[in-house]
């Protein structure tokens, strides 16, 4: 844990590795984007003037391969999936926090300039129309990943006859027939060369961030599997080209989302797209599922996990509803007010500890449970009620939660009475009567009841 300091007063620049747009986003992508959305929202809540950039890779082998299969133009295919990605981000509420979605191929000048600088400084070499980065020239290559050159040699990297070392990586790939290409001018070994081709993957990010943020910026985010080689290569490019160290002041890596013990990915064909997930679950439930694990940690995804999130969400809405609809008394009391202030402090402390969303959500659930209990025990003073509801909704909003107004719906008093009767039977171990009431609630009011360690959960089945 390290104290965060913005480089320029209040200004924070953040770049997050975005998508290569050749297919629909899946829940693994959703985890990354929801994690960094919550981080962005929290930084803004703290008063930082944040600029959040997420790139779109629209020139890539995978896009070209997919376009070849379908007979579509690669740019049209990329544009179509970019549009679908932005729609998905909108639905899971992770789009508005992003200020700019730059496309890699709009930054060719910046890419050309960077390759030129690397060639001048002796970090780049030309072979057969390709340009490679000479990793041995960059002493600090393993700083971020902690790997040794010996390990890198063993790492799965495409071998290429013309490379000086297997771990060298492409800055520019020579044009191939039938593929989109651009031309850059490069002065190399005193000679001017015209190179037709397209950029390597790693240089897109440093070209975009140089153009938008300059030689150094505050936060670089992305999924953990990008740490090596992608982010290591970015550091090698930017620090060698611009001579500024460190290129990025804080690296934030999010843990992967697994399914049946394996990382959810296109290549393993074990993915659930965001669109498929949204047919069964609400966007808020997906967000709650993601944010109930710390962003750095892995999630082992299952339907059971989604069900837990749905349940917790139902609990938050219905319990807040009991409090919101509680009888009001004119007499002013301070207890609700003070509890709300204490909750705010606890929630903020959690978020300020490396964006600890699971802890913050735990405190939100506990506070809402407390509000419900207060309402069940008697009247609530009007002013305290308004204050507490505002705090709950205000802080939940910062992590993109509780955006619906279903808590306003009043549950009939008789139904509430049955719910607490059932709870009492259940606590006494009388499951027969508890089940009898469960059935009555379902038949009479369309209300479903479930149990969780934080309390009884109920929701309208139709809603
Ligand atoms: Zn990237």
Image (cartoon, helix red, strand yellow):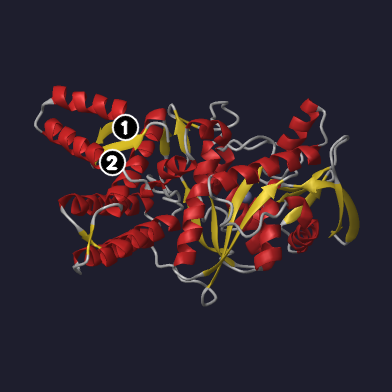
Left or right, 167 with reference to 29: right
Mark 2 or 1, nearer chain start: 2
- Residue placed at 11% from the left, 26% from the top? 430
Q: Position of residue 140 (x, y in %)?
A: 56, 58
In this view, the residue farthest toward the bottom is: 9
- Residue placed at 33% from the left, 59% from the top? 389
Q: Position of residue 380 (x, y in %)?
A: 22, 59
Left or right, 102 with reference to 229: right
**Which residue is tagged 2?**
412
Above or below, 147 against 74 in this view is below
How packed mark 2 is, by other alpha carbons closer than 10 Å (few <14, some 14-19, many 20 or more), is few
- Residue placed at 73% from the left, 39% from the top? 80
Label 2: which secondary element: loop
Would you say residue 178 is visible in this rendering? yes
Q: CA distance from mark 2 to mark 1?
A: 9 Å
Q: Hey, which quadrant is residue 68 in on the image?
A: top right
Above or below, 76 against 383 in this view is above
Label 1: which secondary element: helix
Quadrant into which the C terminus falls: top left
Question: Which of the labelled discs sits on residue 445, or is there none?
Answer: 1
How packed mark 1 is, by other alpha carbons closer than 10 Å (few <14, some 14-19, many 20 or more), is some
Quadrant into which the N terminus falls: bottom left
């Amino acid at each position: 844990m390290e104290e965060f300091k913005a480089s320029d007063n209040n200004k924070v620049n953040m770049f997050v590795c975005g998508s290569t747009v050749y297919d629909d986003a899946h829940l693994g992508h959703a985890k990354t984007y929801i994690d960094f959305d919550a981080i962005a929202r929290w930084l803004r809540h703290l008063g930082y003037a944040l600029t959040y950039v997420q790139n779109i890779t629209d020139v890539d082998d995978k896009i070209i391969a997919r376009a070849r299969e379908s007979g579509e133009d690669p740019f049209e295919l990329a544009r179509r999936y970019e549009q679908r990605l932005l729609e998905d981000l909108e639905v899971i509420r992770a789009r508005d926090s992003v200020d700019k979605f730059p496309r890699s191929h709009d930054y060719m000048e910046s890419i050309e300039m960077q390759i030129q600088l690397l060639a001048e400084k002796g970090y780049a070499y030309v072979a057969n129309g390709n340009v490679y980065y000479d990793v041995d020239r960059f002493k600090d290559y393993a700083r971020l990943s902690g790997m040794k050159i010996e390990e890198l040699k063993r790492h799965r990297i495409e071998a290429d006859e013309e490379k000086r070392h297997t771990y060298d990586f492409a800055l520019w790939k020579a044009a191939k027939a039938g593929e989109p290409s651009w031309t850059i001018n490069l002065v190399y070994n005193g000679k001017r060369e015209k190179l037709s081709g397209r950029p390597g993957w790693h240089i897109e990010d440093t070209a975009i961030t140089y153009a938008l943020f300059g030689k150094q910026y505050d936060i670089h985010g992305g999924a953990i599997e990008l740490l090596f080689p992608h982010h290591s290569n970015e550091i090698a490019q930017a620090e060698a080209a611009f001579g500024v160290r460190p290129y990025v002041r804080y690296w934030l890596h999010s843990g992967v989302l697994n399914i049946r013990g394996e990382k959810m990915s296109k290549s393993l064909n074990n993915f659930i797209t965001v669109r498929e997930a949204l047919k069964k679950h609400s966007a808020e439930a997906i967000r709650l599922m993601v944010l109930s694990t710390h962003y750095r940690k892995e999630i082992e995804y299952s339907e059971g996990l989604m069900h837990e999130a749905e349940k917790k969400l139902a609990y938050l809405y219905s319990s807040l509803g009991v409090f919101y609809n509680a009888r009001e008394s004119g007499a002013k009391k301070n207890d609700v007010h003070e509890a709300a202030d204490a909750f705010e402090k606890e929630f903020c402390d959690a978020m300020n500890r490396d964006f600890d969303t699971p802890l913050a959500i735990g405190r939100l659930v506990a506070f809402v449970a407390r509000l419900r209990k207060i309402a069940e025990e008697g009247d609530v003073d009007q002013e305290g009620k308004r204050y507490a509801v505002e705090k709950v909704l205000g802080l939940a909003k910062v992590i993109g939660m509780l955006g619906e107004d279903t808590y306003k719906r009043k549950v009939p008093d008789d139904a509430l009475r049955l719910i607490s009767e059932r709870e009492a039977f259940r606590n006494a171990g009388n499951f027969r009567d508890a089940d009898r009431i469960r059935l009555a609630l379902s038949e009479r009011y369309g209300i479903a009841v479930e149990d969780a360690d934080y309390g009884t959960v109920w929701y309208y089945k139709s809603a």
